[in-house]
Image (cartoon, rainbow, N blue to C red):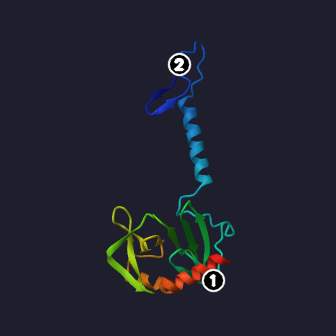
Amino acid sequence: MQVKYAGLLRIGAGPRAGRDDSISSCRLRDMLAALLIAASLAGSAPGQIDWKHPNNNPVRLVDRGFCVGLAWVTLIPGEVAKVGYGPDFNVYNVRGPGTAEWGAYSGFAGESRPDLKHQLLLKNEVTVFRGTDSRGEFNGYFVGDNQQQNHFFGRVFKDAPTDAAFFSRVTFGAAAKARCESYWKK
């Protein structure tokens, strides 16, 4: 039998005569605290990359660049890239030089939507839109076609026209497709 007390589950409460195998609230609190600490050490939130191990899930570079689905991105000196794999998407996180951080989602149903009223730039016949979250707030930049999308995000983006300078190192369109096809064959 299980009995709920103030939102906590009391395990073992019931008709067992002479035996109290319930978990005290102090012990339960200690166990919950230990579980929360263990969970926080075991995994990081998406924005908290463990940069102590730069060789953990490194991104394979070709001519200092890599494919992020619809785009080819060239790293600048001092940047380190890591990749996280999802079931049908990849998230690339880049750090450096210094404390600069940015990332790119490559997949089919990310958490960014194009703000069709705000085009940052047109490059290689591909439009880069201001990206928004479900509340309509800025969360980076969006590129997509009928099948997949890229979401460029991070502290390097300020939701300003000057963000277009970042994309000088990004190739889109047919040139990106050719580089990506070659990249994935190696």
Distance from label 2 to label 1 (Cα)?
A: 65 Å
Which numbered dot is residue 104?
Answer: none
Q: Which three-letter amino acid code belongs to the residue tagged 2?
A: Gly
Pair 2/1: label in front: 1
Which residue is pictured at 47% across the width and 66% down the height? 108
Which residue is pictured at 58% across the width and 79% down the height? 180
Q: Quadrant of the C terminus?
A: bottom right
Give residue 151's position: percent from left, percent from top: 46, 71
- Please name the residue that numbered disc 2 is placed on: 14
Give residue 181's position: percent from left, percent from top: 59, 79
Give residue 17's position: percent from left, percent from top: 58, 12
Which residue is pictured at 61% across the width and 73% down the height? 81
Q: Is residue 176 visible?
A: yes
Relative to 33, is 149 above or below? below
Q: How many marks?
A: 2
| Label 2: which secondary element | loop
Q: Is residue 169 visible?
A: no
Q: Residues within 10 Å of mark 2 (few under 14, many from 20)?
A: some
- Please name the residue that numbered disc 1 is placed on: 64
Give 94 or 122, whichever is nearer the viewer.
122
Give 159 or 127, whichever is nearer the viewer.
127
Among numbered discs 2 and 1, the one appearing first in the sequence: 2
| Label 1: which secondary element | loop
Relative to 157, is 52 above or below? above
Q: Which three-letter amino acid code belongs to the residue tagged 1?
A: Arg
Give residue 128's position: percent from left, percent from top: 41, 79
The answer to whether the residue labelled 2 contacts the one labelled 1, judged by CB atoms less than 8 Å apart, is no
